Structures are given as structure tokens and as C-alpha cells.
Image (spheres, grey):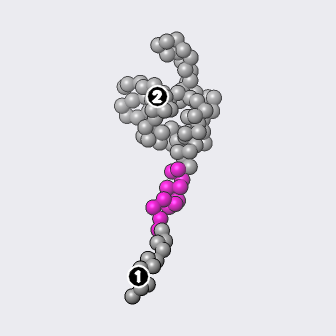
């Protein structure tokens, strides 16, 4: 199984969906994995798994905002706010008959 470190800037919708599903109410300190990368820099990440990979998504305030906004966007879609009906104004040229 491959392990992939992902920055929030490079999140795919699939990974973001997995994050939001795994941490629907946000994440806490106990959810964060801490390790050192190849450059001996401290990294904090959240882990999500698929059938063929383990993704370690770097933690940042922007990640939290991205997850929160993604969840809100899904709520809008689920509630029918997107793709609903739209009123079209009458064409004034039709009244000339």
C-alpha cells in the first residue's frame, strides 16, 4: 500500500470527501499524526485511507477552512439549492402580437 503526503493545495475532491466523511465535526489533536519528513522537518497530518493508498494530508488552518467550506457546499447541493428551478422574465417581444 502506498503512502502519499498531500498538501491542502493539491487535494482532490476524492480525498477532500474522505476527510469530511471521516471528520464531519472537524478534527482534534488526537487525530493528528506527527512525523519528520525526508528533510527532517516536523510535519502534522491527518490520515485517510482508500483501498490502495494511505493519504497523509498536511494540517494547516487553510485545511480546516477548506474542509468546512467543502462541507457547506455539499449541504447546499444536497438541499436542492443548486440546480433548482429559475424564473425567466417574459420576453417583451412576445407581447407585440
Q: Give the residue displayed 55% in from the left and 20% down from the top.
A: 43
Q: How crowded is mark 2: few (under 14 residues within 10 Å), some or many (20 or more)?
A: some
Q: Residues within 10 Å of mark 1 (few under 14, many from 20)?
A: few
C-alpha separation, residue under disc 2 versus residue under disc 1? 56 Å
**Nearer to us in this view, 48 or 65:** 65
* Image: 69 above or below 61: below
Q: What residue is pinned by disc 1? A: 94
Asked which secondary structure carries label 2, the reply is: strand
Q: Give the residue displayed 56% in from the left and 49% down from the top.
A: 72
For the N terminus, the quadrant is top left
Residue 17: x percent and y percent?
Answer: 47, 42
Farthest-out residue, right? 29
* Image: 6 above or below 67: above
Q: Give the residue displayed 58% in from the left and 43% down from the top.
A: 68
Residue range of the region highlighted in magenta in the rendering: 73-85
Asked which secondary structure carries label 1, the reply is: helix
Residue 32 magenta: no
Which numbered circle lies on residue 72? none
Q: What residue is pinned by disc 2? A: 6
Residue 34: x percent and y percent?
Answer: 56, 21
* Image: 80 above or below 15: below
Residue 19: x percent and y percent?
Answer: 50, 38
Relative side of 25 to 12, left or right: right
Relative side of 46 to 3, left or right: right
**Closer to the N terminus: mark 2 or mark 1?**
2
Farthest-out residue, top? 40
Residue 80 magenta: yes
For the C terminus, the quadrant is bottom left
Residue 80: x percent and y percent?
Answer: 50, 61
Q: Can residue 18 be seen in this view?
A: no
Amino acid at each position: 500500500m502506498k503512502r502519499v503526503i498531500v498538501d491542502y493545495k493539491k487535494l482532490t475532491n476524492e480525498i477532500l470527501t474522505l476527510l469530511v466523511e471521516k471528520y464531519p465535526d472537524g478534527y482534534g489533536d488526537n487525530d493528528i499524526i506527527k512525523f519528520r519528513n525526508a528533510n527532517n522537518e516536523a510535519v502534522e497530518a491527518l490520515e485517510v485511507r482508500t483501498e490502495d493508498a494511505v493519504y497523509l494530508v498536511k494540517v494547516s488552518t487553510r485545511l480546516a477552512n477548506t474542509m468546512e467550506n467543502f462541507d457547506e457546499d455539499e449541504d447546499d447541493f444536497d438541499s436542492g439549492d443548486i440546480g433548482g428551478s429559475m424564473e425567466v422574465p417574459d420576453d417583451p417581444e412576445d407581447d407585440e402580437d
